[in-house]
Amino acid sequence: MNSFTQKIALVLQDSMLRGRLLFVLGALVVFRVLASIPVPGINAAQLQLFFNNNQFFGLLNLFSGGGLSNLSIVLLGVGPYITASIILQLLTMMIPRLKQLYQEEGEAGRARFSQYTRFLTLPVALLQGISFLLILEREGILPTLSPFQFGTNLLVITAGSVLLMWLGELITEFGLGNGVSVLIFAGIVARLPRDISQAIFAFTPSQIPTYLGFLAVAIAIVWAVVVVTEAERPVPVTYAKRVRGGKLYGGSSTYLPLRLNQAGVIPIIFALSLLLIPQMAATFFSTSGNALVANVASVALSVFQNLALYGTFYFILVFLFTYFYTAVTFDPHQIAENLQKNGAFIPGVRPGTPTTEYLGRVITRITFVGALFLGFVAVLPIIMQSLTGIQTLTIGGTALLIVVSVILDLARRVDAQISLREY
């Protein structure tokens, strides 16, 4: 506790660190103000019913920081930017030039990759905006819009998404942490008072054991998420001794940290997109004038509403996508080459191809554990609802991972800044 108090005092005394934290707070205030400005002509009752019955828009509301649930001018949130990032990272598997830009050209290459992501965000935001407005009109949440009104609303919400992307990049540059993650974190935290109040209003004395059990499980899950997020598999690395100018260099030993969860929360987002976008399409076509199309859409909706089937497919997809995304972001061949170029080797493993194969085996084994854990966290809300039967008691897997990751990242960055100032 004393160490924590000392860190707080150091943060308050350091003008640069204090300025970065104040910039983050100011940016979050702007974000919450934008998220509270609604698009005119909303049917509030129909909107609430729609969100209660649609998990896909519930996820998108998470990434908009609650802006979608009240149809604010930033209702798209950072969703288009995240989608554009995912598309480009998938393309690195098929386009060697993009892979080289992302993995091999350092800061300059990553800056150009980020620029491509910004360019792609605009058409993605336009497409998502058109889809949202059409579906919300069909559900009766928005009144029927004239072409001019439709175009005006589309431009406003697209500009809102681009504005949030810019705000997130400002937080990354002038604040602390990843700006996009901080904005999502702020949206999740902003929803907590409402979720807690709903649980309190639904409380009855007979549910005391259920609530206590839920609290114990919540604490255990948060602890497990922290442990798995921070878990590493150290691979020992030794630098060969070299003689230069009569002096002996090298011979030191270190380790290569391989994270248990290399992919973060991305596999859950991939799996949700693959499962829930067809659900959105089925919702859209369920009111079609064509009887065959409407019947097919209704059958698809009934399949998606089967929690056991939905949870099973969800778990499998998260598991598979964890391996896929780890393969995109972790290249054993490149790491083996870098070790060899720097005169380093793994004890007991020959440089070159044997090192590549060894790293591949290690990352495959630890990813298995990480994938199982991610799959469990993803389906945790379904499990909790099935066990308790209370809709207000849910532990959102995606939200939980984001919150824990952002808090740990901010803590690491503050510690790094404090250490730098002390030196």
Image (spheres, helix red, strand yellow):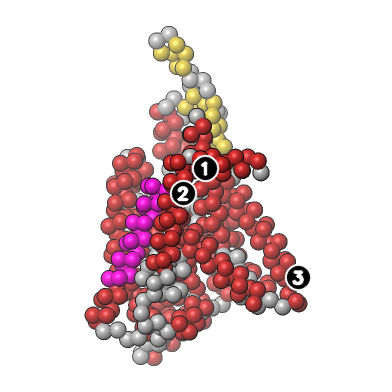
Q: Is residue 75 above or below residue 78?
A: below
Measuring 69% from the left and 66% from the top, which residue is drawn there? 214
- First of labels 3, 2 by sequence position: 2
> What secondary structure is found at the residue carrying circle 1?
helix
Measuring 33% from the left and 66% from the top, which residue is drawn there? 160
Residues at marks 3 and 2, CA–CA distance in whole angstroms: 41 Å
Q: Amino acid at mark 2?
A: Leu
> What secondary structure is found at the residue carrying circle 2?
helix
- Residue neighbourhood size for the residue with mark 1, other residues' Cα within 10 Å, grouped as few (<14), some (14–19), many (≥20): some
- First of labels 3, 1 by sequence position: 1
Report the residue marked by disc 2.
21
Front-lying residue, 113 or 206: 206
Residue 300 coordinates in the image, percent (x, y): 47, 80
> What secondary structure is found at the residue carrying circle 3?
helix
Residue 327 coordinates in the image, percent (x, y): 45, 49
- First of labels 1, 2 by sequence position: 1
Q: Look at discs 3 and 2 and give the one toward the viewer.
A: 2
Q: Contact, CB < 8 Å: mark 1 with mark 2?
A: yes
Taking 242 as reference, is 88 left or right? Answer: left
Quadrant in which residue 377 is drawn: bottom right
Residue 283 coordinates in the image, percent (x, y): 43, 81
Q: Amino acid at mark 3?
A: Pro
Front-lying residue, 90 or 179: 179
Q: Amino acid at mark 1?
A: Val
Report the residue marked by disc 3.
209
Report the residue marked by disc 1.
11
- Residue neighbourhood size for the residue with mark 2, other residues' Cα within 10 Å, grouped as few (<14), some (14–19), many (≥20): some
Residues at marks 3 and 1, CA–CA distance in whole angstroms: 42 Å
Q: Is residue 254 above or below residue 221?
A: above
Is residue 320 among the parts visible in the rendering? no
In this picture, which residue range is highlighted in magenta? 155-175
Residue 246 coordinates in the image, percent (x, y): 43, 8
